[in-house]
Image: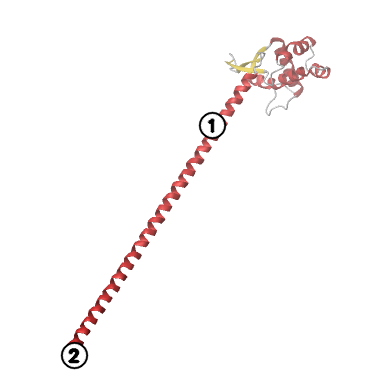
Amino acid sequence: MPTPTKGPRLGGSPAHERMLLNNMAAQLFENKSITTTVTKAKRLRPVAERLITFAKRGDLAARRRVLAQITDKSIVHELFTSIAPAVAERPGGYTRITKIGPRKGDNAPMAVIELVLEPYSPKQATVKEAEAATQAAAADSGSDASAEASAAEETTSQDESAEGTAADETVEEAPAADSEASAEASSEGESSEGESSEGESSEGESAEEK
């Protein structure tokens, strides 16, 4: 039996609770669906599905294990010969709980628990896998797009920094060129002044000779 949940039990003692759940499981296997409270339906689900798992094994040990909980041999025979083959392909989830509203009188929430005997279609699992793969691909494409955007931003920032460096170098070269031009102009002025002074000295010498 699965580990009991915390809180008050359904019966007066643990043995009473086990007998209650076993009887409800027998009624579920016999009638294929029963109406009970939501709390009992949730507590019955793991017990019934565990018995169905034993029935799917189909061996003598599994049959004796089920007979230890359900003493009615006709119900056990129905479980092993009819219910177990119907859910042989289903990996789990042999029961379904449907809430039907509160009960008149004590206003207790009611539910219908039934066996899921519809043929299991592997296509459903394939569709789920395909949806998961699509979501994963979408996530990967989103990450790739963000990586490309970040790379483009980095490239743009690098280009901007390169342009800024080139502009700074141009600005630095311009004052250097201006200083070189001024130096050349000053040297030319000095040479012209030297030539003019030499011309004056030569005129003075010619005047003295006369």
Q: Quadrant of residue 184?
A: bottom left
Name the secondary structure under disc 1.
helix
Q: Could you tell me how many numbered marks the image carries?
A: 2
Q: What residue do we see at 49% from left, 44% from top? A: 151
Q: Quadrant of the C terminus?
A: bottom left
Comes first in the chain, label 2 or label 1:
1
Farthest bottom residue in view: 209
Farthest front residue in view: 210
Determine contact: label 2, label 1, CB under 8 Å: no
Q: Nearer the viewer, residue 115 or 111?
A: 115
Q: What residue do we see at 75% from left, 18% from top? A: 56
Q: Position of residue 62 (x, y in %)?
A: 80, 19
Q: Which residue is mark 1?
A: 138
Report the side of 29 relative to 106 (left or right).
Answer: right
Q: Up-down: is 163 above or below 47?
A: below
Q: Amino acid at mark 2?
A: Glu
Q: Amino acid at mark 1?
A: Ala
- Colour scheme shown: secondary structure
Q: CA distance from mark 2 to mark 1?
A: 106 Å
Q: Position of residue 147 (x, y in %)?
A: 51, 41
Instruction: Return the mark for residue 33.
Output: none
Report the side of 198 relative to 17 (left or right).
Answer: left
Q: Nearer the viewer, residue 161 or 95?
A: 161
Q: Residues within 10 Å of mark 2 (few under 14, many from 20)?
A: few
Q: Nearer the viewer, residue 182 or 45?
A: 182
Q: Nearer the viewer, residue 75 or 79?
A: 79
Q: Quadrant of the N terminus?
A: top right
Report the side of 54 relative to 6 (left or right).
Answer: right
Name the secondary structure under disc 2.
helix
Q: Which residue is mark 2?
A: 209
Q: Position of residue 146 (x, y in %)?
A: 50, 39
